[in-house]
């Protein structure tokens, strides 16, 4: 049993890391909050003045803001739908014994370790290019007109690119949960004559509910900050800009540090609201 002295020693040893982590988060946030109340343009250094909440009202009032909110929601929900369903199907497949199972599992998980910028460029130039891309060559070989993905369906293409990168994560989590399923229950249900679909619906799916909850929670938090894939594929054009890209455009393309900082604070507030409700709604499933 820990004594008061040992607990104090433990806190003392952990405190440097906690303080460093606290400063690493608070200092940039405090600076962003401070700049959000200033008229601060990079093209006019030394002319900063107090702006109050005008940066916030300007950022929210622009039409691009609501379009960015809509794109962010479409991106998050689209990627979650693909990764949860696709990850579940891949986990069920990889859980079956077959030759080369270990190699296949490594190959399936590999895309998760590809940097977002690299992933976006590979899909843009090697797969979706309407002239030299792999999909264009397949269409030409079938006598079909190549489809220009990033021009005709830009947001759906970005959803596909991001989902490809996050699919291994959901597959790994669901496969790990699937391997802890009680095989005796499955064997008993099979001996009782339960069809495969019933065994999946009443045994496998309830067992995976917590793992699905974890996948949705973690992915949602990270998908709210998707940026690199949009930058290297469409550069925010064709109606694909989400909230992080709008903050980038306001700060570094329009040189408006005050407006960009206000957008960043708004993005942080919205992300925390989403995380709060996710923890309240989904967290109940983790406790059962």
Image: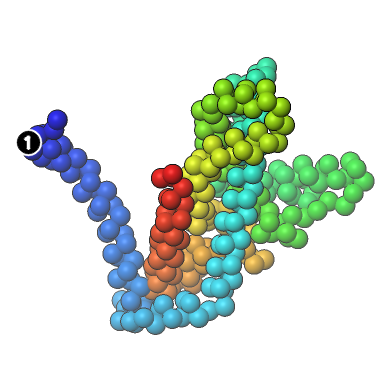
Q: Quadrant of residue 135?
A: top right
Visible residue check, residue 176: yes
x and y, in percent, of residue 209 in the image: 53, 42
Mark 1 residue crowding within 10 angstroms, few (<14) / some (14–19) / many (20+): few
Q: Residue furthest right?
A: 143
x and y, in percent, of residue 197 in the image: 70, 36
Residue 156 vertical placement versus 250 (above, below) = above
x and y, in percent, of residue 253 in the image: 50, 68
Which residue is pictured at 68% across the width and 25% down the height? 192
* Secondary structure under the numbered disc 1 in the rendered image: helix
Residue 37 vertical placement versus 72 (above, below) = below
- Image quadrant where one finds the C terminus: top left
191 lies left or right of 256: right
Q: Residue furthest left?
A: 5
244 lies left or right of 235: left
x and y, in percent, of residue 148 in the image: 77, 55
Which residue is pictured at 48% across the width and 77% down the height? 60
Work out whether residue 194 or residue 153 is closer to the camera in this orientation and state it: 194
- The type of colouring in the image is rainbow
Visible residue check, residue 219: no
Residue 150 vertical placement versus 190 (above, below) = below
Residue topped by disc 1:
5
Work out whether residue 183 or residue 156 is closer to the camera in this orientation and state it: 183
Q: Residue furthest front?
A: 192
Which residue is pictured at 51% across the width and 65% down the height? 243
Which residue is pictured at 30% across the width and 71% down the height? 34
157 lies left or right of 259: right
- Image quadrant where one finds the N terminus: top left
């Amino acid at each position: 049993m820990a004594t008061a002295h040992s607990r104090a020693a433990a806190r003392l040893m952990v405190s440097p890391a906690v303080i460093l982590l606290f400063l690493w988060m608070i200092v940039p946030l405090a600076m962003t909050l401070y700049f959000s109340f200033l008229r601060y343009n990079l093209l006019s250094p030394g002319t900063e003045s107090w702006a109050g909440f005008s940066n916030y009202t300007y950022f929210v009032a622009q039409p691009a803001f609501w379009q960015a909110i809509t794109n962010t929601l479409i991106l998050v929900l689209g990627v979650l739908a693909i990764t949860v369903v696709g990850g579940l199907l891949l986990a069920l497949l990889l859980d079956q014994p077959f030759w080369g199972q270990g190699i296949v599992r490594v190959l399936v998980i590999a895309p998760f370790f590809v940097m977002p910028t690299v992933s976006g460029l590979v899909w843009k130039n090697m797969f979706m290019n309407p002239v030299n891309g792999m999909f264009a060559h397949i269409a030409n070989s079938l006598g079909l007109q190549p489809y220009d993905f990033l021009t005709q369906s830009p947001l759906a293409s970005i959803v596909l690119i991001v989902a490809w990168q996050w699919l291994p994560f959901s597959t790994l989590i669901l496969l790990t949960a699937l391997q802890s399923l009680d095989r005796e229950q499955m064997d008993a249900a099979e001996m009782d004559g339960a069809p495969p679909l019933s065994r999946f619906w009443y045994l496998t799916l309830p067992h995976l509910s917590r793992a699905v909850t974890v996948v949705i929670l973690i992915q949602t938090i990270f998908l709210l900050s998707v940026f690199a894939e949009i930058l290297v594929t469409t550069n925010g054009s064709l109606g694909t800009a989400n909230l992080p890209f709008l903050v980038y455009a306001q700060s570094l393309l329009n040189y408006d540090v005050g407006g960009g900082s206000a957008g960043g604070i708004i993005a942080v507030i919205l992300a925390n609201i989403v995380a709060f409700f996710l923890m309240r709604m989904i967290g109940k499933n983790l406790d059962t």
